[in-house]
Image (cartoon, rainbow, N blue to C red):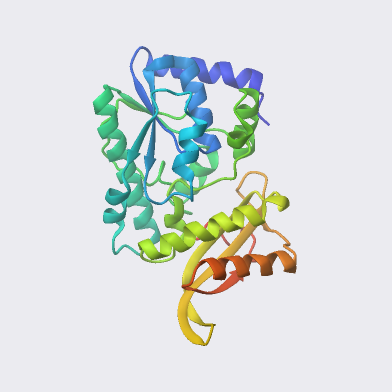
Amino acid sequence: MVDTDEFIPEAVAEIQEEIGDSKAIIALSGGVDSSVAAALAYEAIGDNLVPIYVDTGLMRKGETEQIRETFDYMHSLDIVEAQDRFLDALEGVTDPEEKREIIGEQFIREFEREAKAVDAEYLVQGTIYPDRIESEGGIKSHHNVGGLPEVMDFEGIVEPVRDLYKDEVREVARAMGLEEVVSERMPFPGPGLAVRVIGEITEEKLEVARESNHIIEEELEEYDPWQALAAVIGKATGVKGDNRVHGWVVSVRSVESRDGMTARAQNIDWETLQRIQSRITGTNDNVARVVYDVTHKPPATIEYE
């Protein structure tokens, strides 16, 4: 485990040395990784840090509003409305790796535009060790590692938590006094709901995924999962009222893990699963059925794409 008394001052000193008197932007998602990176960078360079939150249109329900409330103490917080640009770039794309690469490049272009506006030369990211392992090992490209474009208009990219696992990042968050809503927040992938929609991303599928994920996080909170999610995985025949429907299939997934490198599917009681399926099919008229994923990691990954 990480020695926070040693790690925090060393990380701050490293950021100070790398960025110096220059300006930097922090890619802030609201998750614990980027939040800790932001806190470390703010301690290192103060007002020379500009936090940027990009609303990609692929976020969870109420995500942008929560970010605005949680980080309102950062008066320079810039919320970028980029939904149309991301969804236009993803139109017609079905390959998971291509999705990740498109999202990674689009993020960088947004950050380059914002950095130019504030004369920032550096980009700070919340990349953690498992991101690097999975990207470099060919398992899947993370938008902030393997999904990055080859050419980027930054003097350097700073990754203060690059050698930490998720549970270690949480320790640092607690040691730095970050709010529990941040330090204990459930992991959410950088590409957002894009990796919880199989095949082409459409507004309809995103809305189903967004509402279903909101229900899952509410219903499974008592199980304290490492990660709980809902994915739109295809279509199937169902019956609603007296009508036959060809609606979406939503897969529910809830896992236990220490660091995200391996995971075990949780044993969820039948009553809870039935309540989940009732809420999801009742909330979404175009959902035909709900299934529960019992696969561990390995052989599966936690996310679907």
Q: What residue is drawn where x is 43% and y is 15%?
A: 45
Q: Is residue 160 visible?
A: no
Query: Picture coordinates of residue 274 (x, y %)?
Result: 68, 70
Residue 206 image-quadrant placement: bottom left
Residue placed most toward the observer, 30 or 139: 30
| 29 shown above or below 229 | above
| 12 shown above or below 31 | above
| 174 shown above or below 60 | above
Looking at this view, name the residue that lies furthest to the top.
Answer: 21
Q: What residue is drawn where x is 35% and y is 49%?
A: 103
Asked if residue 121 lies left or right of residue 100, the reply is left
Residue placed most toward the observer, 286 or 133: 286
Q: What residue is drawn where x is 75% and y is 65%?
A: 269
- Image quadrant in which the N terminus is located: top right
Residue placed most toward the observer, 167 or 216: 216
Query: Picture coordinates of residue 238 (x, y %)?
Result: 52, 82
Number of numbered callouts drawn:
0
Asked if residue 94 lies left or right of residue 72, the reply is left
Asked if residue 73 lies left or right of residue 272, the reply is left
Q: What residue is drawn where x is 57% and y is 61%?
A: 300
Query: Picture coordinates of residue 224 (x, y %)?
Result: 70, 49
Residue placed most toward the observer, 126 or 178: 178
Query: Picture coordinates of residue 111 (x, y %)?
Result: 31, 35
| 221 shown above or below 211 | above
Q: Is residue 128 visible?
A: yes
